[in-house]
Amino acid sequence: MRMIDLNSDLGESFGAWRMGDDSAMLDVVSSANVACGFHAGDPAGILRTLRAAAERGIAIGAHVGYRDLVGFGRRNMDPNSEELIGDVIYQIGALQGLATAAGTRVTYVKPHGALYNTIAFDTRQASDVIAAILAVDASLALVALAGSPLVAQAKAAGLTVVAEAFADRGYTAEGALVSRREAGAVLHDPDMIAKRMVRLVQDGVVEAIDGTLTKIDAQSICVHGDSPGAVAIAQRLRSALEEAGIAIGACAGAAG
């Protein structure tokens, strides 16, 4: 039986500001990318999400990002290597401490937003993130954009890599994500999204924004927790995958 991991970005609420529905999403996904406080999330809320994930046996990933609360980590930045390595180590360590308190542990790292997109193709910043992970725990897996140069770079450095596709994002013909500044970047139709992702798992292709079929080799699918209708999208996606005989479960490298 084919198997795919479903992940979502969680723990992103901040004080009185609520982002997404972590509890409902945790009933659907197999892995949780939990904010570490730099792009979103406060310690109490992060701990709450970790405890809820632990109760459900969900794999935990450190969702590290640029130091950018105002921009939700989606603004491009160019920290020097010393800063970026230190920031990533700090975020992983913070989440590890909270995870221990919640009775669970961090098993992988998934960069967030602008950092995620930058290191997919920027060798220097990618090297810094890889170095930070290796400095903390070389057994931590790295979730990376499927088909990007980062996949080979991280594997060459000795990391386990989980290649990722995005359920609710548009793709270019080259296999990159459509910029959020462009039309068609974010998808909202649960049935259409589910159909696309079943095809991805079964045939290894996704329809790009120009209508061409782009090859995507992914072991994990992300549904953004902050997207409108995120829970409905995730529920429909899971149902469609299971109806197609595809099992849902955390990737071996990230399951712990």
Image (cartoon, grey):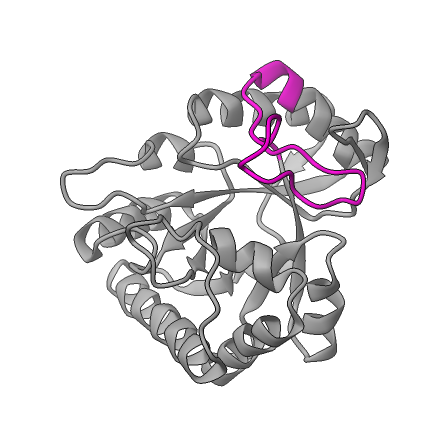
Q: Specify whether residue 255 is in view.
A: no
Q: Is residue 151 above or below residue 158?
A: above
Secondary structure that dominates the magenta span:
loop
Position of 126 with respect to 93 (left or right) is: right
Q: Position of residue 26 (x, y in %)?
A: 40, 37
Where does residue 171 sit, x and y in percent of width and height? 70, 36
Q: Residue furthest left?
A: 16
Question: Which residue does the image show at 67% across and 72% down from the upper left?
Answer: 154
Point 66% across, 17% down: residue: 192
At 26% from the left edge and 43% from the top edge, which residue is drawn?
Answer: 13
Q: Name the quadrant containing residue 25.
A: top left
Q: Is residue 177 magenta?
A: yes
Query: Which quarter of the image is occupied by the N terminus?
Result: top right
Nearer to me, 169 or 122: 122
Q: Which residue corresponds to the image point at 47% horizontal and 54% vertical from the top-left?
A: 112
Q: Is residue 139 above or below residue 4?
A: below
Q: Is residue 22 left or right of residue 47?
A: right
Q: Position of residue 23 (x, y in %)?
A: 32, 34
Q: Is 186 displayed left or right of 214 in the figure?
A: left
Quadrant of res 246: top right
- Left or right: where does residue 109 sit relative to residue 92? right
Q: Is residue 186 visible?
A: yes
Q: Position of residue 224 (x, y in %)?
A: 48, 37
Q: Decide whether residue 93 is among the magenta residues.
A: no
In this view, 94 is above or below 43:
below
| Count of marks, rendered view | 0
Residue 79: which quarter of the image?
bottom left
Instruction: Provide the residue span drawn in magenta.
Output: 167-193
